[in-house]
Image (cartoon, rainbow, N blue to C red):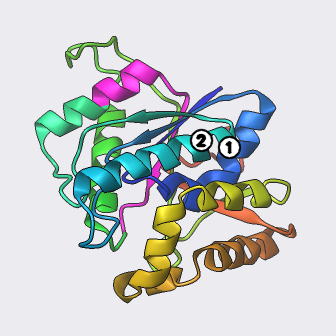
Amino acid sequence: MHLAAIVAHPDDAEIFCGGTLAKHADRGDKVTVVYMTRGEYGGGSDTTEAEIAATREQEANTAAETLGVETAFLDYEDGRITYSLENRLQIVDTLREHRPDIVLTHFRDDMHPDHRTTSRLVTDAYYMSSLPLVETVNEPWEPQNIYYVGKPTSSFDPDVYVDISEYQSKKEDAIRDHESQVEWLQEHGGIDAEFDDLIEGVRAQARTLGRTRGVEFAEGFVPLHKHTTAYLD
């Protein structure tokens, strides 16, 4: 199996589904994290966007080693991802290039505009990726499903759970690999106040989800295609 998480910024995958990615990688599955941007808005005015982007790309690659996954970077600009036919076709070609069985991405209801736009682009590209008359560099490909990740502050209400009890510590280590962003979020406050203590917040959310499943830690997902529970299966 090949999983591809297509997320807006470095650290998004680690925060929202890092335990699941590590668990699949440990099982022997191929796992790729595709970053739409390099997160160049994630810093203060005492540095440049280029410097932040370089730092965050390096941190993302370090986190990937911790989780046992691969990385790829697209060239969208942080805070400026827009929905267009051109961008949708680029994501179509990204799906065809990596050929994942399962795609993970942001839930549609999210405070961050990059998360919302990424969700829409990936969802629409998923539909178009298998169409032979949609021409891109790579050949058509049809992933099996999309699983959405989200924040507890949105209308995100997961109905698929993955037990990550044995991978919570690895998830936290991968988040800590994003050293500059952990520091930035803890200092930034404001709209990211929920992440004032990033590691503690992520751990608390995983523990809360775990309690609903009878395990210590879990991550939650909303699938695009929901499986039947009786008949038609």
Q: Which residue is mark 1?
A: 67
Q: Residue at x 30, y 53 (%)?
A: 51
Q: Is residue 215 magenta?
A: no
Which quadrant: the C terminus?
top right
**Above or below, comparing residue 71 to residue 132 in the picture:** below
Q: Residue at x 18, y 38 (%)?
A: 87
Question: In the rendered structure, which segment of residues is drawn in magenta?
Answer: 92-109
Question: Badge 2: few (under 14), some or many (20 or more) residues near its Cα, within 10 Å?
Answer: many
| Residue 40 in picture, x, y percent from top left | 29, 56
**Above or below, comparing residue 105 to residue 87 in the picture:** below
Which quadrant: the N terminus?
top right
Q: Residues under labels 1 and 2: Cα distance?
A: 5 Å
Q: Which residue is mark 2?
A: 64
Name the amino acid, label 1.
Answer: Leu
| Residue 213 in picture, x, y percent from top left | 81, 68
Name the amino acid, label 2.
Answer: Ala
Label at residue 211: none
- Would residue 128 be visible to someone looking at this image? no
Answer whether labels 1 and 2 touch (C-beta < 8 Å): yes
